[in-house]
Amino acid sequence: MNEKILIVEDDPKIRSGLRDNLEFEGYIIDDAWNFAMAEEKWQTINPDLIILDLMLPGRSGYQLLKEMRRRGFETPVIILSARGEVWDKIKGFRLGCDDYVVKPFSIIELIARIRALIRRSTPVTQPDEVITIANLKLNIPNRSIQINESSIELAGKEFELIHFFMINLGRVISRKEFLAEVWNSSPDMVTRTVDVYVSNLRNKLIGSGCEIQTVYKIGYRFKVLKK
């Protein structure tokens, strides 16, 4: 993951917290805390996404968004603001924002929204039809999985779950992200669903050379076992 995100936020605590969490997720982060700095950076670093606060020193985030869209800058923008009235949101969408998140916010939900926007804005390439990791082989067209050439029976959402694990090898994935990406469900859905499926899948991956690692209070990581 090499996507660049520009954080435009004048509150140093929020800015620092966003940077730490997004860098942990593998994003390349730059930031700005006023209009002039943000205007310079969105033109020079060419970010893949911008997180934009509305209450900036000098001119507002609305004005920055309007200027970006006027110049044809189409990169996804998420407004992150304490201004949560309906008309604030409508104004943001009319000026061209792609999402609007109200403070205080859930960092897990924000990361899910960031990932979804970047994915939608990235040109679609033809995925590999077969993914092989260690002794595990996933055949996407056939929706089948093999361990050492032996077929493994999958139930319900297990195919989508192991596919998502394999294309995110080594990355920590939250339960809420699994629900959004695999189950296409609201982040409010009970996360116990993920735990049950992961438990069942673990038993089926014996001998694959891979493991599903639990990351305390966050979610799971799919990794290759050390020899």
Image (cartoon, rainbow, N blue to C red):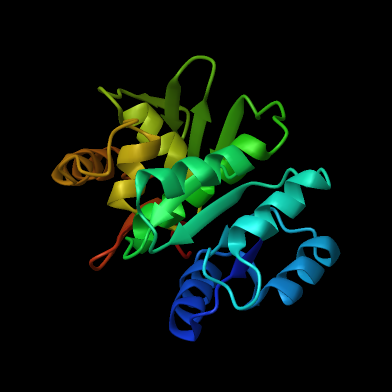
Q: Quadrant of the N terminus?
A: bottom right
| Residue at image location 60% in from the left, 69% down from the top | 8
Residue 18 drawn at (x, y percent): 48, 72
Question: Which residue is painted at 83% across and 62% down in the image?
Answer: 43
Closest to the observer: 101 or 34? Answer: 34
Q: Position of residue 79 (x, y in %)?
A: 51, 55
Q: Is residue 197 above or below residue 1?
A: above
Q: Which residue: 70% across, 26% down?
A: 126
Which of 169 and 58 lies nearest the eye of the viewer?
A: 58
Q: Position of residue 191 (x, y in %)?
A: 19, 46
Taking depth in this image into account, of 4 and 132 the one nearest to the observer is 4
The residue lying at 37 percent from left, 43 percent from top is 86
For this orientation, the residue located farthest to the bottom is: 12
Number of numbered discs: 0
Does residue 121 show up? yes
Q: Is residue 46 left or right of residue 203?
A: right
Q: State whether residue 208 appears in this view.
A: no
Residue 204: image quadrant is: top left
Nearer to us in this view, 98 or 173: 98
